[in-house]
Amino acid sequence: MLNLLKDIAGHRDLISILVARDLKIRYKRSVLGFLWSLLNPLFFILIYTVFLKILKFYRPGDVMFLPMLVTGVITWQFLSTCVGDSLHSVVGNANLVQKTAFPRIILPLSMNLANLVNFLLSLVILLLYTIIAREFCAVPISFKSIWMVPLVFMTQFALCFGLSLFFGSLNVFFRDTEHIVAVLMMAWFFLTPVIYYHSCIPTQYQKLAFLNPMCGIVTAYRTAFLGTDIMAPRLVLMSFGIAWLVCAAGIAFFQKVQSRFVEEM
Amino acid sequence: MWKRCDMSEDIVINVEKVCKRFRLRLASRTLKAAVLEAVLHRAPAGPREYQALDNVSFNVRKGETLGIIGANGAGKSTLLALVSRTMKPTSGIITTRGSISCLLELGAGFHPDLSGRENVYLYGAIMGLTRKQMSDKFDRIVDFAELRDWIDEPVKHYSSGMYVRLAFAVAVEVDPDILLIDEVLAVGDAAFQTKCGERMKEFRERGKTMLIISHDLPTVESISDRILFLEEGRVHGLGETTSMVEDYRRFMRRKEEASAKRVWGNHDIMITGVDMMNPDGSRAGVFKSGKPAVIRIKYHAKGEIRRPVFGFSISDSSGRVVYGNNTQIENFVIPSVKGDGAINMVVDPILVARGDYLLSLSVHSEDHLTNYCRMDHAFVLKVECDRNYEGSYMPVKWSLE
């Protein structure tokens, strides 16, 4: 483990170049370029707000519903883009993997870091949105728990990294991974309280629901950004623990199989 | 014990009993199949493993240049991939000392969408160089690759020559301790090849180590200190350059002959061998054009075969028949053959231009309906000639009118 960290630290420049490359290629040939990282969540919020209002999707008095949903969707998106991109993090760099030797774990890591940059920008938009909602729409949002953001954020990053290590390497061996992941992500989306309050989960299933690390993470984000009370701090902590476990397992798995990448590609 | 330490002082690459097996994946292998295999401990169907390298051992000293030659599929590229650590050996140990830069096939892992400049920095970073170190080398790289005007274009727009130029320039300029080159120089034009050759020589003179794979034998021979000759994953030979290259040439010739060789027939009469002789009965390695050539065809007949016809043809190296004839055409009747025997054929004189010819032989029935034995391009006939005509000789008389 220590060796791995040393190895990664020794390739700092490589990581920064790969992150820059990922970001650059993402917005290659687009006129607005990097601005899209800001515009995407912005449009997101706009569309949800307008349509859900028109459709009367939620109870009229429920002013917290939209901020709750926006927080959920924006933070969920980080996970879903990380997982989606991770499928190609190794396979898509076949020429690098086949022709040069470097710690392979740098590929999914730098991909996640590139997504992280985007996510941070989304969080800025989210913060602006909550401020606007509080000041101009009289939504009872409080920032008393905003200090939690870095903690939640790091936990989510650990989860994303761990998953991307699994999916990125599995996809080298079985291209079926892509299709399986698409289905899994859809199910996971509905298992996680992204577009509903976590209190909607029947009480007898609460414990079970928090075995899903995203359940705790989304709940914690809501507490951080909206100031809603954490209903089950112990369950949230369990979720967090599972996220970090996934990360550790992902690293172990990736390190075990990475020596076979070249011949399987 | 300490002798060993002493030895390892200047050995920078040590390959010890290295094997590499590839699992051949069936085209239809899926997750489902893998799960079933794992769950049911079922052995997967079909050919499974391919031994790319088999018990390969050698070492390379600091400052030495080792050429690696061998036919396609001999395991050369696999060996380089193992030394560069992009792959792990199945068994055995590879130890290397110092940084390794490699040019495996085309390009050093360039990203097609990135510009030449970005790729140069990317490669430097992979090699563990800092951005600062890379900027210091950048101008030299661009100058060497002659890509001043193109360096900010995405490399996917480069021609293959430009691509290789940049790849070579980067791989050498990052100043590794060991440079691995896999058959890349063939792509550049002559001027660039000369430049590469000079740069490699300079690299050598600075006491750096190189491993070079190439099919361009004269080049490998001239640049290497020693040559490793691989054949089907095994070390066929390792040693002095000239003799290894010669071995390889001989080997390839034999292989070519073998692949052109076809034997068929019902084997009632088998041709068991051929002796090439001088008229005095001594073995002839080479025939002299204009002198007699004696070819003894040895056969084995199962039972008694009546009136067989023996025939031959001589083809040039490209397979074109130069001359063919048989006993029937020449009205030489063989009443019958039985058991082991031999038939002598005297070509007097043999009149063809100098070269290596291929001799085909056949035995068939008088009515041509039964083919007993036929061997196409089975034997090599070497002919020397003092005169420089081409093809087969026909007497000519020149006169002025």
Image (tube, rainbow, N blue to C red):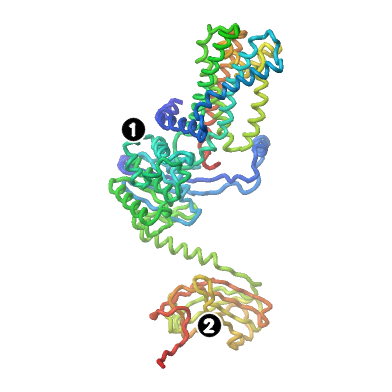
Q: Quick one: SS at disc 1?
A: helix
Q: Is residue B4 visible?
A: no
The quadrant the C terminus of chain B occupies is: bottom left
Query: Numbered disc 1: what chain?
Result: B
Residue at the spot x=38%, y=46% of the render?
B147
Relative to B226, A41 lies left or right: right
Label 1 Cα crowd, 10 Å radius (few <14 / some 14-19 / many 20+): few
Q: Quick one: SS at disc 2?
A: strand
Toward which corner of the image does residue B30 lie, by quadrant?
top right
Toward which corner of the image does residue B153 lie, by quadrant?
top left
Rendering coords of residue B199 (x, y %):
32, 49
The quadrant the N terminus of chain B occupies is: top left
Residue at the spot x=48%, y=34% of the render?
A104
Relative to B348, B266 lies left or right: right
Rendering coords of residue A233 (x, y %):
59, 9
Rendering coords of residue B298 (x, y %):
55, 77
Please tell me which residue lies in front, B219 or B14: B219
Query: Numbered disc 2: what chain?
Result: B
On the same chain, marks 1 and 2? The answer is yes
Disc 1 residue type? Lys
Rendering coords of residue A239 (x, y %):
59, 16
- Gap between marks 1 and 2 measured at Cα: 79 Å
Label 2 Cα crowd, 10 Å radius (few <14 / some 14-19 / many 20+): some
Residue that numbered label 1 is attached to: B132
Q: Is residue A54 above or below residue B342?
A: above
Disc 2 residue type? Asn
Residue that numbered label 2 is attached to: B344
